[in-house]
Amino acid sequence: MAALGWLTPRRRSATARSVLAGEASAEAARKSSQEAPPTTPEEPEFPVIGDDRAAAFFDLDNTVMQGAALFHFGRGLYKRKFFETRDLARFAWQQAWFRLAGVEDPEHMQDARDSALSIVKGHRVAELESIGEEIYDEYMADRIWPGTRALAQAHLDAGQKVWLVTAAPVEIAQVIARRLGLTGALGTVAESVDGVYTGKLVGEPLHGPAKAEAVRALAAAEGLDLSRCAAYSDSHNDIPMLSLVGHPYAINPDAKLRRHAREKDWRLRDYRTGRKAAKVGIPAAAGVGAVAGGTAAAIALSRRRR
């Protein structure tokens, strides 16, 4: 058995340093078991209930609504014989581009704007507003993103005003805002005289930097603090508007906006696939026929996706 003595653990006296180390370790373990587990700090509740100096600004196309509101509106105008079938071939590929790329091509949309203005020239504003109500029910109501709608409702429930901000004609934007129960809408204004469209715009389309200027002007008129306001968009074209507010959100973002949002640590949410993006601030509660319908809109009251 002596030969197996090397297998037996040798007894060694504990040194003062080893005793101190053991006692320190035991004390640390005891304290750790008595303390509550660490928690991750929660973000402050947003939107802040009762903050009447805060408001929310929502882009429309691909943010609130799937696709371009103008294309959906154009389907209704085509159905009502505002233009002829031969026009579809010219604009079919523009809608196809929009569907595939998710962004507007400047040349396409310039051409669409010019055609649209010529089509509505001579029509009464009241007529287009009435038609807009019908077209919303026919083509737009089931294309509202539920997630974005919940975000807007969260602001409304907090007692804040909510506006759409879009390059779509203001008449269309106002119909959509009214149907969603929002405060109102900022949109491109087509010139009219005595209630009849002239075929010209007032100023320029509400797009890119123009959106930011509209939001800034409205905030000043309403007494809002932009650092307490929120803005939502899918497009890098709206970075000027998003940069104005203290709470910018990238919703269904294009590639450029996604990169920018990550660089700036903006909140992201993508409803196109149901996946949540990197950072979320508001709770979640919060074919020939398709091409023809989209192309119709390209020549109906349109110039740009916003």
Image (spheres, helix red, strand yellow):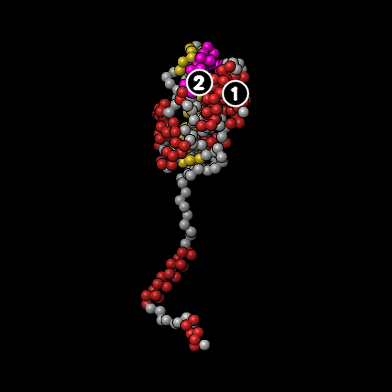
- Magenta-tinted stretch: 108-132
Residue 209 horizontal side relative to residue 293, left or right? left
Q: Is residue 73 above or below residue 260?
A: above
Q: Is residue 185 above or below residue 276?
A: above
Q: Is residue 286 above or below residue 29?
A: above
**Mark 1 or mark 2: whose residue is earlier in sequence:** 2
The answer to which of 109 and 56 lies nearer the viewer is 109
Dot label at residue 117: none
Q: Residue at x 54, y 42 (%)?
A: 275
Q: Which residue is mark 1?
A: 292
Q: Counting other residues with Cα less than 10 Å from the Cα at mark 1, is it few (<14), some (14-19), or many (20 or more)?
A: many
The answer to which of 281 and 50 lies nearer the viewer is 281
Residue 5 visible in the current orientation: yes
Q: Residue at x 57, y 20 (%)?
A: 88
Q: Counting other residues with Cα less than 10 Å from the Cα at mark 2, is it few (<14), some (14-19), or many (20 or more)?
A: many
Does the magenta run of residues contain 20? no
Q: Residue at x 62, y 25 (%)?
A: 289
Amino acid type at mark 1: Ala
Which quarter of the picture shows residue 140? Answer: top right
